[in-house]
Amino acid sequence: MEIARRVGMAASATLERLRKLEESGIIRQYEARLQPQALGFGLLAFIFVRIEGPGAALATGERLAAIPEVQEVHHIAGEDCFLVKVRTESTAKLGEILREKFGGIAAIRSTRTAIAFTTLKETNHLPLPDGEAQR
């Protein structure tokens, strides 16, 4: 087992620790990291969303999260209420998503969109101090 080799532990001990991390909810899921461009999702956009009234925040966030092209929804501080990460195939498709899907959510007052030209770093890794991964 590659993980056991990297941390210098027996495979059985490593599997037991992984099982405990899964049961405690520290490890939430395993997933493959796909190359979006290779699958036709070459456009990455970040959309700032402003909504009407604070009471609509949870429901609005849940509706945004249900949109298939949305990869992340963050409830944020500041003038905007949400920062949403979207991947799609083209600017035309992004426009359609904004008009039809975002536009269909009544609480949304306005959006501002930033399109990424290049991604220099994108990761889910956490900067754990040495030894944290072995606990």
Image (spheres, rainbow, N blue to C red):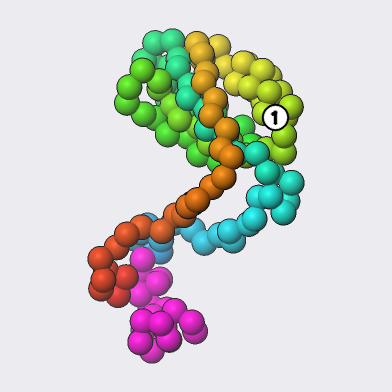
Q: Does 118 appear above or below 26? A: above
Query: 110 or 16, which lies in front?
Result: 110
Of the 4 image quadrants, the one containing the C terminus is bottom left
The question of residue 76 being in magenta is answered with: no
Tell me which residue sits at (52%, 61%) in the image.
30
Tell me which residue sits at (56%, 38%) in the image.
116
Tell me which residue sits at (68%, 19%) in the image.
100
Range of magenta residues: 1-21
Q: Secondary structure at mark 1?
A: helix
Instruction: From the image, give the main secondary structure of the stretch colored magenta.
Output: helix
Q: Position of residue 81 (x, y in %)?
A: 40, 22
Query: 11 or 132, which lies in front?
Result: 132
Q: Does 77 appear above or below 79? A: below
Residue assigned mark 1: 91
Residue 50 image-quadrant placement: top left
Q: Position of residue 130 (x, y in %)?
A: 26, 71
Q: Does 35 appear above or below 102? A: below
User: Please, what is the three-letter code of the amino acid marked with disc 1?
Assistant: Thr
The local crowd at label 1, few if under 14, some if 14 to 19, many if 20 or more residues have their Cα within 10 Å, is some
